[in-house]
Amino acid sequence: MPAAYTRYERVVWRAFVSEVVRGGRVIAAMRLATAAPSSSALFVLVGAEDVVAVAAHDRHSLRLTSAWGRLSQLRSSVGHGREPSGPRGVDVMSRDIEARRPGFDPDALREKYRAERDKRLRADGNDQYINVVGQYERFVRDPFATSEINRAPLHDDVDVVIVGGGFGGLLAGAHLRRAGVEGIRIVEQGSDFGGTWYWNRYPGAQCDIESYVYMPLLEEMGYMPKEKYSFGDEILEYTQRLASSFDLYRDVCFQTGVTGNRWDDEAHRWIITTNRGDEMRARFVVLSTGVLNRPKLPALEGIDDFNGHSFHTSRWDYAYTGGGPNGDLTGLRGKRVGIIGTGASAIQSVPHLAASAKRLYVFQRTPSSVDVRGNRPTDPSWVKSLGPGWQEERITNFNVLVGGGHQDVDLVNDGWTDIISRLATFMPRQGGADISPEQAALAAELADFEKMESIRARVDATVDNKQTAEALKPYYRQFCKRPCFHDEYLPAYNLPNVTLIDTAGKGVTRITNTGVVVGDETYEVDCLIYASGFEVGTSWARRSGFESIGRDGITLTDRWADGPRTFHGFLSRGFPNCFLMGLTQTGLTPNFTLMLHEQAKHIAYVIEQTNRRGCTTVETSRRAEDDWQAEMRRMAMFTKDFFEACTPGYYNNEGHVSDHTGLIASAYGGGSEAFFAIIRAWRDAGSLDGLELA
Ligand SMILES: Cc1cc2nc3c(=O)[nH]c(=O)nc-3n(C[C@H](O)[C@H](O)[C@H](O)COP(=O)(O)OP(=O)(O)OC[C@H]3O[C@@H](n4cnc5c(N)ncnc54)[C@H](O)[C@@H]3O)c2cc1C
């Protein structure tokens, strides 16, 4: 790489060379010169005389284009090319470079992102939300129970109690069945299996990850989703199929909330107490109480004063709104409706509210990134073409790509992989040139700007009212918040009955008995819907609704006072035979069911091995737990800076980035594929290193 290049050019050069070397084709690289010195340049990689690829950049952006053909053709397409003036250079007065200049100024965008984040930063972090207990319990009551279950309290003994009947609990149950465990009892607050999909039945609820990779065990179940992105009712029905197929209805306790979980060190049993007076004993417990399970409400002044009707999106009140998950909310005809929040639940439900309500006010603090959805029915000829093992291959392909890795083909090929493959173009790869983390970060930032510019351009192209369009544009990096995908959300703002109330990052000011106040303006509503999301950064006990008490009376909350402490995210010292699922110190991926599936396999393996070795208890050693803390901290450094620059949300612990709590503390910084490789290798070794069995 020529030493005289500017710092930025060096970044571009290394990124570019790395990218093409990965393809194994490069023989030589040359800089094709600048239109304005140091502000733009065109790089060409040639294999002999054949042009392999072209990269154009200006001060702020690199674009890599395949340009197969002869070098001479490229020169003529550039137009003003001259013969090489040196061994590796062709000076070009290049219109082409100018044409590739991105239509944004990265410095201005950086400043804008910072300003938008700062508007939203607040000292209270997670305390800005109400814990939905006491007078707020009505917001979490089950509106979907068709009848009340009556049964006597249980005081029995089972092999395994699994708390939570969502995908996590179901997958744990399925793998434990496969491991030959008979006495499995799932305890679930809801009236059936489904978890997220039991509770979230709002109109338009749909998975945002392709259903062929989101819905686990499709091949074993002989099931194929009806559409590329399934709607909630189909996913709910599928969870119940899974439960039947693995015989998990056998000993289930629905409408049962666990209130406590205590280790009896003499009996070597966990004692699980519930709100029905149960006192079950279990050799093992698996806590799968959910990743986005505990609804949160904004702690707004006057929230208790509202005299109209209100509910949280995760407990949709169809008795009031009429209609169902497909919309047609007849009960809202003639009604003024407000919805607070513009995350995924609002994005999916707003088009249905817009179609039914007389008036709809959408109260926004931070706009979501709303990319193309492009849902379509499953193609029967594609289904016929699939061979055995197709789902695992597809899941892995997707996960590697969304983790920034390389795959020769993009099987899912949607908004998720589009984002990542754009980013990946600018990132260094294993085996590629030696790019420093700073250089890679810069290249990724530029690609991110480009992606988000396209998201903002989509708003402009869709929303008629210029002021509304401006307010709907997200100014933060793509993965600061979970990206959304929808094709009807933005057009809803062109309807005459729909108004976006942008709060300039401040949120709603207060609630009155008849409406919502933002600044000095009051918006009168009959119905107020909280699309305010779910707790992530609060304690495990608060999110689960119960405390676990381990050996010597220590609570999980105290043990984790300085952040989660586990070995591989499953076992915590002092809590033998108690397995954690979900957002622990684990391999986080946008496809949550993959994470849960890998966790379930691992837990079933450890329980099976404990049984097979004739042991009663299994617990992590202190050394293994300490080593995992050190590894988690070491790897967290790679994500900390990114999240600190983000607009507040649950991804960055509401702007209070910490390795003690929230997503960063939960996610292995090396990425999910690396994490899965670690735990698979650990199982393959077969020595149960780091565990103490007795
Ligand atoms: C609206 C919405 C859409 C989503 N879409 C996607 C998506 O497209 N792709 C994706 O990957 N992820 C998505 N997620 C994340 C989703 O939560 C996971 O995909 C997955 O379903 C989580 O499964 P789980 O078993 O870990 O948790 P859950 O499904 O939340 O199940 C946990 C269960 O534990 C029960 N429980 C909790 N505490 C207790 C207690 N004390 N006693 C008894 N029972 C208790 C709860 O009632 C709940 O049913 C979405 C989440 C939401 C909210």
Image (cartoon, helix red, strand yellow):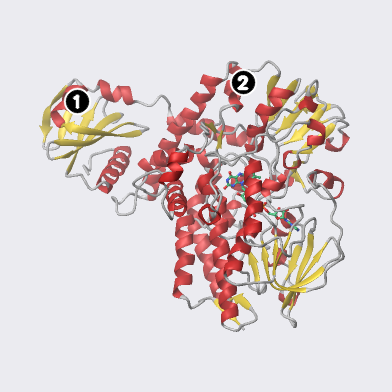
In the picture shown, does residue 20 fall above or below 680?
A: above
Q: Which residue is mark 2?
A: 468
- Residue 17 x %, y %: 26, 44
State whether label 1 is within 8 Å of ligand 1: no
- Residue 320 x %, y %: 82, 33
**Label 2 near label 1: C-beta < 8 Å?**
no
Q: Please, what is the three-letter code of the amino acid marked with disc 2?
A: Thr
In the picture shown, does residue 302 fall above or below 287?
A: above
Residue 590 seen in the figure: no
Quadrant holding the N terminus: top left
The alpha-carbon separation of the residues under discs 1 and 2 comes to 43 Å
Closer to us: 515 or 694: 694
How many discs appear? 2
Closer to us: 592 or 374: 374
Residue 202 seen in the figure: yes
Q: Residue at x 61, y 66 (%)?
A: 565
Check disc 1 and report its element: helix, strand or loop: strand
Q: Please, what is the three-letter code of the amino acid marked with disc 1?
A: Val
- Residue 640 x %, y %: 52, 50
In the picture shown, does residue 491 fall above or below 365?
A: above
First in sequence: mark 1 vs mark 2: 1
Disc number for residue 390 = none
Q: Residue at x 68, y 51 (%)?
A: 194
Q: Which residue is mark 1?
A: 92
State whether label 2 is within 8 Å of ligand 1: no
Check disc 2 and report its element: helix, strand or loop: helix
Q: Nearer the viewer, mark 1 or mark 2?
A: 2
